[in-house]
Image: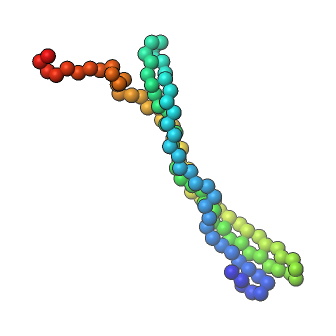
Amino acid sequence: MPLSPKWGLNFGIRPLTRVNYNVDQLEERTFFDTLKLNTVNRFEGSGGIYQAYVGSGIGFGGFSVGVNIGYLFGNVTKSTSLLFPLARPGSMTSSPPGT
């Protein structure tokens, strides 16, 4: 925004990063030397970083000079989880009562 014919000012907020992911990685693990279970490593992330800035510039004939300052804010949340199955498919059988 011009403050005079040779002097200007700018300000604003802009996004710098954006994080949004959810990745599952299947892995077979061995417990107690004999028990093999499929587990899931889950990686999740969300959030973002923004910049608030203000700047000013002045012109001298065909030359101009300016300065900008800014402040970064926001958050990025990351998490890693290890998920275990409740039961292996087919490892539990059920029979109707009385059979």
- Quadrant for the N terminus in the image: bottom right
Q: Residue at x 41, y 28 (%)?
A: 84
- Quadrant for the C terminus in the image: top left
Q: Residue at x 45, y 12 (%)?
A: 34
- Figure quadrant of residue 83: top left
Q: Residue at x 63, y 62 (%)?
A: 51
Q: Where 66 falls versus 45 (above or below)? A: below
- Residue 50, percent from left and from top: 60, 60
34 sits to left or right of 3: left
61 sits to left or right of 56: right
27 sits to left or right of 94: right
Q: Where 54 falls versus 79 (above or below)? A: below
View extreme (bottom): residue: 5
**Foreground residue among 99 and 64:** 99
View extreme (top): residue: 33
**Foreground residue among 58 and 14:** 14
- Residue 94, percent from left and from top: 23, 21
Q: Where 69 falls versus 61 (above or below)? A: above
Colour pattern: rainbow
Q: Residue at x 56, y 51 (%)?
A: 19
Tally the numbered discs: 0
- Residue 31, percent from left and from top: 46, 17
- Residue 54, percent from left and from top: 68, 71
49 sits to left or right of 85: right
Q: Where 3 falls versus 65 (above or below)? A: below
View extreme (left): residue: 98
